Amino acid sequence: MQRIYFKNRTLTICTEEELNTLPQDVMLLHPSEGYELSEIPFMMEKNPSIRNLVIVAENTPEQELFNQIFAKVHQINAGGGLITNNLGDSLMIYRNGIWDLPKGKQEPGEDIMVTAHREVLEEVGIDAEPLEFICTTHHTYRLEGEPFVKSTSWYLMKVEGRPEATPQTEEGIEKCEWVTPEDLDYRLANTYGSILEVFAKKSQLL
């Protein structure tokens, strides 16, 4: 299953079996033969009333269907990290009025785990090695009028205690905070759907 976020709305690509695990209020799209799949992202942009659109990958692998849908959109790969400590805290960053996790674009020829480690070090100043893959999330945005979809590979990283984090202010990060389990829900009430997915998938690893 692949879920792509259009801000607070979603496009989900799944199998027939996975369809049974989704909420009942989704909008199901069965593209007919010849349907221009690459127009779907623009349809999502133009129709904010579409909250949760689902496409079932019947005879096409999910990744191939993803590529067909986003054929007219710039695709970017990124790596990011969810840093936790032995106290159960999680390191989060605050940028553009939203709580987020450190991440960044993959450089040409760079292994995605190296990307995740480098970007975390650059954005929060903590040298934490990726330990375990959590999930890949996808979100769309526009930059200078051009449409993009960013696919971020997330890794679990662990440290001892609460090492001081230094926000990369030139990237718009206002602050970094170690968030306790008791305060986590408050932060997650003001975050992106993709970040909620990372935390949900991380809890399944434990």
Image (tube, rainbow, N blue to C red):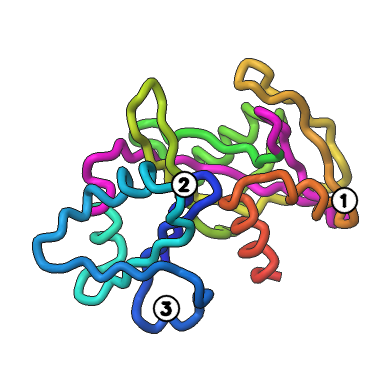
The residue pinned by badge 3 equals: 19
The residue pinned by badge 1 equals: 183
User: First in sequence: mark 1 or mark 3?
Assistant: 3
Residue 129 percent across, percent down from the top left: 64, 45
Q: CA distance from mark 3 to mark 2?
A: 20 Å
Q: Give amino acid for label 2.
A: Phe
Q: Is residue 93 highlighted in magenta?
A: yes
Q: Nearer the viewer, residue 77 or 30?
A: 30
> To which quarter of the image does residue 141 belong?
top left
147 versus 31 height, above or below? above
Q: Is residue 94 highlighted in magenta?
A: yes
Q: State the residue at coordinates (56%, 51%).
A: 194
Closer to viewer: mark 1 or mark 3: 3
Residue 188 percent across, percent down from the top left: 74, 50
In the drawing, does residue 120 fall left or right of residue 16? right
Q: Nearer the viewer, residue 61 or 70?
A: 70
Which portion, as a residue range, is magenta?
A: 69-98
Q: Residues within 10 Å of mark 1 (few under 14, many from 20)?
A: few
Asked if the residues shown at circle 1 and circle 2 are in contact, with their CB atoms under 8 angstroms apart, the answer is no
> To which quarter of the image does residue 54 belong?
bottom left
Q: Give amino acid for label 3.
A: Leu
155 versus 164 height, above or below? below
Closer to viewer: mark 1 or mark 2: 2
128 versus 147 height, above or below? below
In the drawing, does residue 88 fall left or right of residue 72? right
Q: Which mark is residue 6?
A: 2
Asked if the residues shown at circle 1 and circle 3 are in contact, with their CB atoms under 8 angstroms apart, the answer is no
